Amino acid sequence: MMRVVSTDGVVDVDVADEGERSLVGSHYAAVRGYLDTGRTDRLADFEGRIVVGVDPQTGEVDPYELEVDPDALDDREAEGDLDIDHIYPNRRW
């Protein structure tokens, strides 16, 4: 299970594909980088990128577009949606 910062919000989904898991991790690092510095250059790499995840509650397979809009990220940060420790919701470090 991974947390995905998508255009639909922050969602916890099962991402089966290793390449897509890597993409989610890289995107999360870019989002954190933007929130920490205000620089948007790393977000541009994820424009239009989609990962496929399985909703653990419904079992449905859905596409999730990665969020790259700075205004949307700022709004989610202000609402506390991005106040997360890491992208693996069930892990305790």
Image (spheres, rainbow, N blue to C red):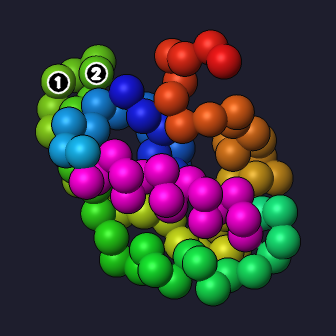
How far is the residue under mark 1 from the one under mark 2?
A: 5 Å
Q: 74 left or right of 66? A: right
User: Which residue appears at 72% of the width and 65% of the height?
Assistant: 33
For residue 2, which quarter of the picture? top left
Quadrant holding the C terminus: top right
In the image, residue 90 sits, relative to residue 79, either above or below, namely above
**Residue type of the residue flagged with mark 2:** Pro
Quadrant holding the N terminus: top left
**Residue type of the residue flagged with mark 1:** Gly
Residue 59: numbered disc? 1
For residue 58, which quarter of the picture? top left
Look at the numbered disc 2 and give the secondary structure of its residue: loop
| Rendering coords of residue 85 (x, y %) | 70, 33
Residue that mark 2 sits on: 56
- Residue range in magenta is 19-34
| Rendering coords of residue 7 (x, y %) | 46, 61
Mark 1 is surrounded, within 10 Å at the Cα level, by few (under 14), some (14 to 19) or many (20 or more) other residues, namely few
User: Which residue appears at 61% of the width and 65% of the height?
Assistant: 30
